[in-house]
Amino acid sequence: MTPPLATVGLTEQEARAAGYRVKIAGEPVAEIVAMPRAYIMEETRGFMKFVIDADTDEILGAVLLSIDAQELINTVALAIRHGVTAAELRDAVYNHPTSTEAFNEVLATIVRVDMPHTADA
């Protein structure tokens, strides 16, 4: 499949069903300025989406439909296994020009956040 599709962890729906309050970070590849490899390779189709625990900032899952997704997903899986937060993955320094640079921008692009849980009266 071109571009490749890779997933790891929980989907947005699975995370909510498991009781997490989630925030979603995502961006179309064509809009990711910090991903020069996509432009160099002339493959800007796709989307990156991260499901993040809104309370702890831990990454719960990701869906990557992009150039090099089959490689990028391994970094995300490692982050999930070791409790690396979205902020830590976002703020890391990556080689240039690589597709991992997209993490800097995509993880800073929060598109929605669940409302805080409230106690029943």
Image: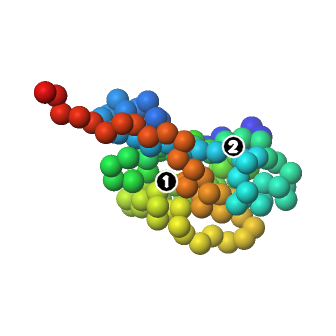
State the separation of the CA atoms marked 2 and 1.
21 Å
**Which amino acid type is marked by label 1?**
Ala
Left or right position of 117 against 114: left
- Residue under label 1: 77
Quadrant of the rendered structure where residue 41 is? bottom right
Which of 52/80 is in front?
52
- Sequence order check, earlier mark of 2 and 1: 2
Which residue is drawn at the image coordinates 27% and 36% (left, top)?
Answer: 117
Find residue 69 and name its label.
none
Which residue is drawn at the image coordinates 78% and 60% (left, top)?
Answer: 37
Q: Secondary structure at mark 1?
A: helix
Residue 73 visible in the displayed image: no
**Contact, CB < 8 Å: mark 2 with mark 1?**
no
**Which amino acid type is marked by label 2?**
Pro
Q: Position of residue 106 (x, y in %)?
A: 60, 52
Residue 112 visible in the displayed image: yes
Which residue is drawn at the image coordinates 83% and 55% (left, top)?
Answer: 39
- Residue under label 2: 28
Which of 89/116 is in front?
116
